Image (cartoon, grey):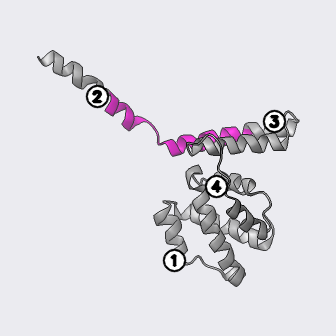
Amino acid sequence: MKCIIMICILPLWLNAQQSTSMPKEGLDDRKKWEVLRQRIETAVDRGDISREEADKRYASFRARATGQRVERKDLVMESHFKRLGIDDIDELKNRLLDQDIPADQLDAVLGGMLRLVHAVKLDRENYRMNPRIEAYFKDRLGLTSSQANKILLISKEIVSGSF
């Protein structure tokens, strides 16, 4: 009887041990993004692939990271950023991924960035992040203070036209 119980419990116990020692998926996705980004940019520099093909591969990665086959395009969001001078929202998404923003949070971060950009336009250099926007990024989206500050810096670049 003890043998049967051990046979049933042992696999469950081993599975529990293995799942606690494995790294979080966000870290794994971050590493995958860094490797992919380096390989694709090297291939573009060598002329092996075109910039358009690189953009397609980036979009494919972002879709897979969010559990989709094809990246969903938000035309309303794109039109808002076009009014701000950002013609390629995919480049902005790639830049956010470079800044450790999780792929599954990109659309939500972009929505918050729109509000942030409009607020920065009003106050320019002296702008400090509104506590409500900061709470949105940190509490609701689960970003760190460092990530929120990186979003603020990118928003300031968009306002100044240096993005």
Q: Do the residues labelled 1 and 4 touch (CB within 8 Å)?
A: no
Which residue position holds label 4? Answer: 99
- Return the disc, 3 or 2, that comes first in the chain's sequence: 2
Element assignment for label 4: loop
- Return the disc, 2 or 1, that comes first in the chain's sequence: 2
- Return the disc, 3 or 1, that comes first in the chain's sequence: 3
- Residue drawn 46% across the image and 39% down it: 23
Cα separation between marks 3 and 2: 45 Å
Residue nearest the observer in this picture, 118 or 31: 118
Cα separation between marks 2 and 4: 38 Å
Element assignment for label 3: helix
Identify the residue at the far left of this view: 1
Mark 2: amino acid: Leu
Left-right relation of 129 to 85: left
Cα separation between marks 1 and 4: 21 Å
Cα separation between marks 4 and 3: 22 Å
**In this picture, is 86 found above or below 63?**
below
Identify the residue at the far right of this view: 47
Element assignment for label 1: helix
Left-right relation of 130 to 10: right
Which residue position holds label 2? Answer: 12
**In this picture, is 127 found above or below 21?**
below
Which residue position holds label 1? Answer: 131
- Residue drawn 80% across the image and 38% down it: 42
Mark 3: amino acid: Ala
Label 4 neighbour load within 10 Å: few <14, some 14-19, many 20+: some
- Residue drawn 68% across the image and 77% down it: 118
Residue nearest the observer in this picture, 100 or 77: 77
Which residue position holds label 3? Answer: 43
- Residue 90: image x %, image y %? 73, 53
- Return the disc, 1 or 4, that comes first in the chain's sequence: 4
